[in-house]
């Protein structure tokens, strides 16, 4: 759904050579190539010698300033929870070799799950996605809030306080960006009528907050079965209710492939909650509003069915009570 963004930086072989030798003087750079599909510019760098695995060079725009530090911090948490997450090898913010900040990390095996959606066993991979997300949610967090380079920014002790403020903010942004006034008013009434569900959150957990086919890698294992092989892009991570993150994963993944919703939910497993279906609907309302605001702020065609236009259609359906 999100448009790809570029930092318009052109690499050359000499710069790549200096970057890898800055990490390890014994490294010799081979070829390099742009990897597509991310929200920042990412390159594969091959190293000479059979013992050296390829590297990933991730280049960060100037804003947000805290982006590289956040990803390194959060990646450390994720590597404690799953072997599918990469470790950050280096972050360089000196701008001595490139005019922008960058990170180096190992290249994970496999390809984006987007490339496997025509596979006959794709639903099994979706179940693995649900299992992986549940494993991520095993890490408790001390408070609710968005994560920056130093940890949770402006931590809030309860989910009710955190999400009440978040809903107020997203409805304000919806109005400020030209969203339909009557639609916004009716959606806000529906949201406020469900605020009681926020009290059901027992504690905050680590949330990926951008968990979909584009950020999960997969390959064919030794048995020939499709299996997940990597998890990437931790720039959205936050501490929140587990169902907040599950709803975002279902929303984004089902947008890419409607078949993914059921197996992800099955893979995630049972949740002890008074009304999980209604709560997922409630959080999906928030995520659709947030996505509309983000795409609209980026200047995407407001009528685009694959973007703001489709989201508005879905929000109208939610007002009518269909939850579509």
Image (cartoon, rainbow, N blue to C red):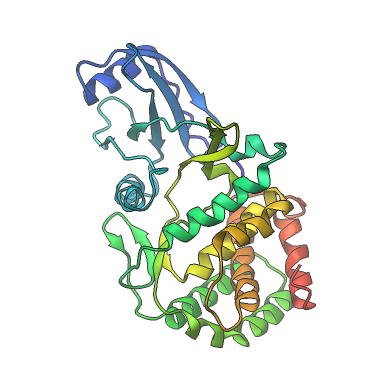
Outermost left residue: 25
Q: Is residue 148 above or below residue 18?
A: below
Image position, residue 315 (x, y; %): 73, 68
Q: Quadrant of the C terminus?
A: bottom right
Q: Is residue 179 above or below residue 21?
A: below
- In this rendering, would 209 be left or right of 19? right
Residue 273 visible in image: yes
- In this rendering, would 267 be left or right of 107? right
- The residue drawn where x is 43% and y is 82% is 161
- The residue drawn where x is 57% and y is 61% is 248
Image quarter of residue 223: top right
- In this view of the protein, which residue sits in the foreground, 321 or 311? 321
Residue 175 visible in image: no
- The residue drawn where x is 42% and y is 57% is 237
Q: Is residue 308 above or below residue 113?
A: below
Image quarter of residue 153: bottom left
- In this rendering, would 89 be left or right of 245? left
Image position, residue 230 (x, y; %): 47, 40
- The residue drawn where x is 49% and y is 57% is 133
Image position, residue 307 (x, y; %): 70, 52
- In this rendering, would 296 be left or right of 34? right
| Total marks placed | 0
Image position, residue 296 (x, y; %): 63, 56
- In this view of the protein, which residue sits in the foreground, 223 or 1? 223
């Amino acid at each position: 759904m999100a448009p790809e963004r570029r930092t318009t930086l052109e690499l050359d072989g000499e710069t790549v050579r200096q970057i890898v030798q800055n990490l390890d003087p014994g490294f010799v750079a081979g070829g390099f190539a742009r990897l597509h599909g991310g929200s920042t510019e990412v390159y594969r760098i091959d190293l000479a010698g059979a013992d050296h695995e390829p590297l990933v060079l991730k280049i960060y725009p100037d804003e947000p300033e805290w982006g590289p530090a956040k990803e390194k911090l959060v990646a450390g948490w994720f590597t404690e929870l799953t072997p599918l997450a990469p470790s950050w090898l280096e972050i360089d913010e000196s701008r001595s070799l490139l005019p922008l900040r960058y990170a180096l990390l190992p290249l994970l095996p496999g390809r984006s799950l987007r490339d496997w959606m025509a596979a006959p066993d794709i639903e099994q991979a979706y179940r693995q996605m649900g299992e992986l997300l549940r494993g991520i949610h095993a890490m408790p967090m001390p408070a609710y809030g968005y994560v920056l380079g130093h940890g949770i920014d402006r931590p809030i002790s309860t989910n009710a306080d955190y999400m009440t403020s978040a809903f107020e903010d997203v409805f304000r942004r919806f109005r400020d960006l030209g969203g339909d006034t009557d639609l916004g008013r009716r959606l806000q009434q529906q949201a406020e009528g469900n605020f009681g569900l926020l009290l059901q959150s027992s504690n905050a957990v680590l949330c990926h907050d951008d968990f979909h086919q584009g950020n999960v890698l997969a390959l064919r294992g030794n048995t020939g079965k499709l299996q997940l092989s990597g998890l990437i892009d931790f720039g959205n991570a936050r501490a929140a209710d587990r169902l907040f993150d599950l709803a975002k994963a279902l929303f984004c993944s089902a947008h890419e492939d409607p078949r993914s919703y059921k197996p992800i939910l099955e893979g995630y497993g049972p949740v002890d909650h008074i009304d999980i279906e209604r709560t997922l609907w409630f959080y999906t309302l928030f995520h659709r509003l947030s996505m509309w605001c983000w795409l609209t702020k980026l200047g995407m065609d407001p009528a685009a069915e694959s973007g703001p236009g489709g989201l508005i259609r879905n929000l109208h359906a939610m007002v009518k009570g269909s939850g579509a």
